[in-house]
């Protein structure tokens, strides 16, 4: 059974940084695409960043230049480095990964940015 577990969220002041991790466990031989979403209160879940199996990346306009998505295939872990955080980045951040044609979700980690 595949599990994704996010960590690294917390409370930070505007302008600060956090690094989120998404660790996978279970019977996993390889992970294809990995995505990070966030969901703010009262808003729909939004795609923040994505990385393909060959390292190609995508960023939402709102985070481009501030966030960096990366992956460590040996550790089956993905990361989201978030710099110059803004109050509007406050949300629950979710990891989403495609493994053998099935998309899996983590439980989410809260990020709160104070002004």
Image: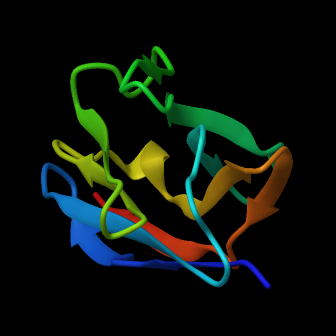
Residue drawn 73% across the image and 78% down it: 2
Foreground residue among 100 and 6:
100
Foreground residue among 11 and 100:
100
Please state the horizontal and vertical placement of residue 74, each as a whole percent of the image: 30, 63
User: Does 74 sit left or right of 29 as displayed?
Assistant: left
Q: Is residue 112 above or below residue 82?
A: below
Q: Is residue 98 above or below residue 59?
A: below
Residue drawn 32% across the image and 78% down it: 11
Please state the horizontal and vertical placement of residue 88, each as a whole percent of the image: 47, 44
User: Does 60 sit left or right of 13 as displayed?
Assistant: right
Please state the horizontal and vertical placement of residue 31, each as a whole percent of the image: 57, 51
User: Does 81 sit left or right of 87 as displayed?
Assistant: left
Residue drawn 70% across the image and 79% down it: 107
Please state the horizontal and vertical placement of residue 61, each as a whole percent of the image: 46, 14
Image quadrant in which the C terminus is located: bottom left
Image quadrant in which the N terminus is located: bottom right
Residue 79 placement: quadrant: bottom left
Residue 101 placement: quadrant: top right
């Amino acid at each position: 059974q595949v599990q994704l577990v996010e960590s690294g969220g917390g409370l930070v002041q505007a302008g600060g940084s956090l690094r989120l991790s998404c660790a996978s466990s279970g019977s996993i031989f390889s992970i294809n695409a990995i995505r990070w979403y966030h969901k703010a209160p009262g808003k729909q879940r939004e795609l923040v960043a994505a990385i393909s199996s060959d390292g190609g990346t995508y960023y939402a306009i709102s985070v481009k230049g501030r966030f960096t998505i990366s992956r460590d295939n040996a550790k089956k872990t993905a990361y989201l480095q978030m710099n110059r955080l803004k109050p509007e980045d406050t949300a629950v951040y979710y990891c989403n990964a495609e493994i053998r044609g099935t998309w899996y979700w983590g439980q989410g980690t809260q990020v709160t940015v104070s002004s």
